Image (cartoon, rainbow, N blue to C red):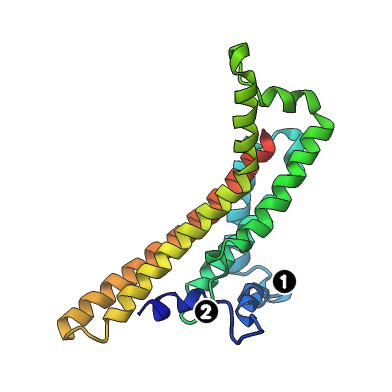
């Protein structure tokens, strides 16, 4: 039971090859060329979403970082599409492995930290010491703030992974119980499974949005 429950999270297709990670490239086929989407409903929907996200990011990022909205919007799109692709039956969910969000959070967080420490050294030091801290607690406060900054990329990646994995495990449990249920129970389970799928789609959107917002907040600090 445990093997079938977590088999959807196994990236290996053989002892040496991990082809399931190729599911992350499915987004290249989901997004059609602009020639086929010109003046289409897809472009209109994405334009409305992009304008809304751009407006939200402008309220978080200052004018100095307004150019980073394109990076954050692209990050949101990548996470969102990978979350949605993972909801397709028998498709590997890349965002359920912490290595996938870490591949985005660590490089972005590192670049933010390097930029702030090189360009705004004094302000970076002041963030390590909250205002009003007693002198005796300064060394301990600096250590705590440093550790909290270092674990930020891991925490944001773990948040995304845990939320996506929990939903997929629950859907797998409900799906495995369908063959053993009776007729009326089957209809009820299908209804619950459909409702859970809709809920997971909303979670996929929210988690991609939260991932983008948290990275934007780290940049704004």
**What residue is disc 2 on?**
91
Q: Is residue 189 left or right of residue 56?
A: left
Element marked by disc 1: helix
Residue 145 in picture, x, y percent from top left: 62, 31
In screen coordinates, is 160 left or right of 118? left
Residue at image location 73% in from the left, 25% down from the top: 125
Element type at mark 2: loop
Q: What's the residue at 54%, 72% (across, down)?
A: 85
Residue placed under numbered mark 1 in the picture: 34
Q: Position of residue 104 (x, y in %)?
A: 67, 56
Residue 143 at x, y percent in the picture: 63, 30
- Left or right of 108 in this view: 115: right
Q: Is residue 221 above or below residue 203?
A: above
Q: Nearer the viewer, residue 181 or 130?
A: 130
Task: Name the one closer to the observer, 43 or 95.
Answer: 95
* As drawn, 61 above or below 70: above
Q: CA distance from mark 1 to mark 2?
A: 26 Å
Q: Residue at x 33, y 74 (%)?
A: 173
The residue carrying pointer 2 sits among few (fewer than 14), some (14 to 19) or many (20 or more) residues within 10 Å by Cα, namely some
């Amino acid at each position: 039971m445990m093997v079938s429950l977590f088999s959807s999270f196994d990236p290996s297709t053989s002892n040496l090859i991990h082809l399931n990670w190729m599911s992350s490239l499915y987004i290249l086929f989901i997004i059609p060329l602009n020639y086929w989407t010109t003046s289409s409903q897809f472009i209109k929907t994405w334009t409305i979403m992009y304008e809304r996200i751009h407006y939200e990011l402008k309220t978080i990022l200052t004018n100095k970082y307004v150019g980073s909205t394109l990076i954050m919007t692209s990050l949101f799109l990548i996470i969102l599409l990978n979350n949605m692709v993972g909801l397709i039956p028998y498709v590997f969910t890349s965002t359920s492995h912490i290595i996938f969000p870490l591949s985005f959070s660590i490089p972005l967080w590192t670049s933010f930290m390097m930029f702030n420490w090189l360009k705004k050294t004094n302000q970076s030091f002041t963030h390590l010491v909250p205002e009003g801290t007693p002198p005796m607690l300064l060394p301990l406060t600096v250590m705590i703030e440093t550790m909290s900054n270092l674990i930020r990329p891991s925490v944001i990646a773990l948040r995304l992974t845990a939320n996506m994995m929990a939903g997929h495990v629950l859907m797998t449990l409900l799906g495995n119980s369908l063959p053993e249920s009776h007729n009326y129970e089957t209809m009820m389970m299908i209804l619950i499974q459909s409702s859970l799928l809709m809920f997971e789609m909303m979670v996929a959107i929210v988690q991609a949005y939260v991932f983008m917002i948290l990275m934007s907040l780290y940049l704004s600090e």
